[in-house]
């Protein structure tokens, strides 16, 4: 959590400014105290009234506001923040800071602060790739400023696509956690498995299950938000993976076991993946075709490795806490208890 962390959000003037309203909400949900500075250009896209309603605080907009500057407000804002987030960080804002300008409240605060700074760039792809922007980005990084994004995708302008989209609010939140290094699980490494596995029959067909990966994704995101370093090993899930984690994508049970072993040691391991119990012993190298006889091919199955049991019974590198899951339809407690004893895990969720 970000309980009582003081975050100063500097909102730059770009179409992505509307996303900062969601960002404020996400930060406050996690306990942060958020104050906002808006550039003149930012106010063309979102209003101080909207931002103030979400921060529940005064919004600072003018370096020469007599009331705000009675006690040298830009210095006070710079001193009081635990972290400054600039979103969207426009090409102009990056250029002015990279060259030491302090001609508005936003840049004056950024030059006066000793707090860590996190920037979320947002601009047209051609602006992002321009040599001047690349130089400014490199200079800001060398000055110790951290960046999240920009992401690739479609832009607000019709027909425009490329790298330049502002990172999504949850991606920025994850970067805030990483920058502040807080939370009760800070310094802990947690391994999470998620999603189904696909066991090939031939290059086209496979055996799978209906797991979406939603549960594992939610667990990984929650652990990340508590400050843990999360390694997320996932099969072909339909739910997008969480941001701010070390992502490892696999297809089969054997690939998942190899990825899990490579991720160890860990302080805890949460095995939420729906791993196939069986695989085709000799998957065909070419697509299997009907021969017109009406006879179905005979498939020989082999047992997949038991990842939960393998890790639970390790002599070395066993996580201090191993959590398994039991999806049962009847006698839930009895079956889950028996599974925990059989597998050797510490906890089981049923």
Image (cartoon, helix red, strand yellow):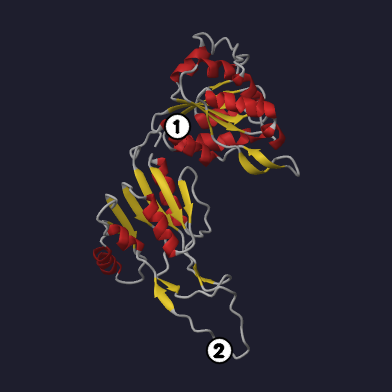
Which one is nearer the viewer's eye here, 84 or 320? 320
Up-down relation of residue 289 to residue 292 (above or below): above
Up-down relation of residue 289 to residue 15 (above or below): below
Which one is nearer the viewer's eye here, 332 or 237? 237
Residue identifier under label 2? 295
Residue at point 62%, 22% (across, down): 39
Residue identifier under label 1? 179
Tag 2, which secondary structure? loop
Asked whether, in this view, residue 336 is left or right of residue 275, the answer is: left
Which one is nearer the viewer's eye here, 293 or 223? 293
Packing grade of label 1 (10 A; few <14, some 14-19, many >=20) is some
Q: Is residue 336 visible?
A: yes
Q: Quadrant of residue 331?
A: bottom left
Tag 1, which secondary structure? helix
Residue at point 40%, 58% (across, down): 258
Up-down relation of residue 314 to residue 175 (above or below): below
Residue at the far bottom in the pictured view? 293
**Quadrant placement of the C terminus:** bottom left
Please provide percent x and percent y for residue 327. Answer: 37, 66
């Amino acid at each position: 959590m970000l309980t009582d962390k003081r975050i100063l959000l500097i909102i730059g003037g770009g179409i992505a400014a509307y996303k900062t309203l969601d960002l404020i909400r996400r930060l406050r949900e996690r306990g942060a105290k958020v104050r906002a500075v808006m550039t003149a250009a930012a106010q063309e896209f979102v209003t101080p009234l909207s931002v103030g309603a979400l921060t529940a605080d005064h919004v600072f907009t003018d370096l020469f506001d007599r009331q705000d500057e009675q006690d040298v407000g830009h210095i006070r804002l710079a001193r009081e923040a635990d972290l400054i987030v600039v979103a969207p960080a426009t090409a102009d804002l990056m250029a002015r800071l990279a060259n030491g300008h302090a001609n508005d409240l936003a840049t004056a605060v950024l030059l006066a602060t000793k707090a860590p700074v996190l920037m979320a760039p947002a601009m047209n792809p051609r602006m992002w790739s321009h040599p001047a922007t690349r130089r400014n980005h490199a200079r800001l990084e060398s000055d110790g400023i951290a960046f999240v994004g920009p992401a690739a995708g479609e832009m607000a302008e019709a027909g425009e696509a490329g790298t330049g989209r502002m990172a999504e609010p949850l991606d920025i939140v994850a970067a805030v956690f990483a920058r502040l290094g807080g939370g009760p699980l800070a310094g802990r490494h947690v391994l999470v498995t998620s999603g189904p596995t696909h066991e090939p029959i031939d290059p086209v067909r496979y055996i799978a299950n209906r797991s979406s990966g939603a549960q594992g994704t939610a667990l990984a995101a929650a652990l990340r938000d508590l400050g843990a370093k999360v390694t997320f090993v996932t099969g072909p899930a339909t739910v997008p993976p969480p941001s701010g984690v070390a992502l490892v994508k696999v297809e089969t049970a054997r690939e998942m076991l190899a990825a899990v072993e490579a991720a160890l040691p860990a302080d805890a391991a949460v095995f939420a993946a729906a791993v196939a119990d069986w695989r085709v012993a000799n998957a065909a190298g070419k697509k299997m075709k009907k021969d017109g006889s009406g006879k179905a091919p005979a498939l020989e199955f082999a047992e997949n490795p038991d990842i939960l049991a393998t890790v639970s019974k390790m002599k070395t590198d066993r996580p201090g806490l191993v959590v398994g899951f039991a999806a049962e339809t009847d006698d839930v407690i009895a079956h889950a208890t028996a599974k925990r004893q059989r597998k050797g895990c510490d906890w089981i969720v049923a």
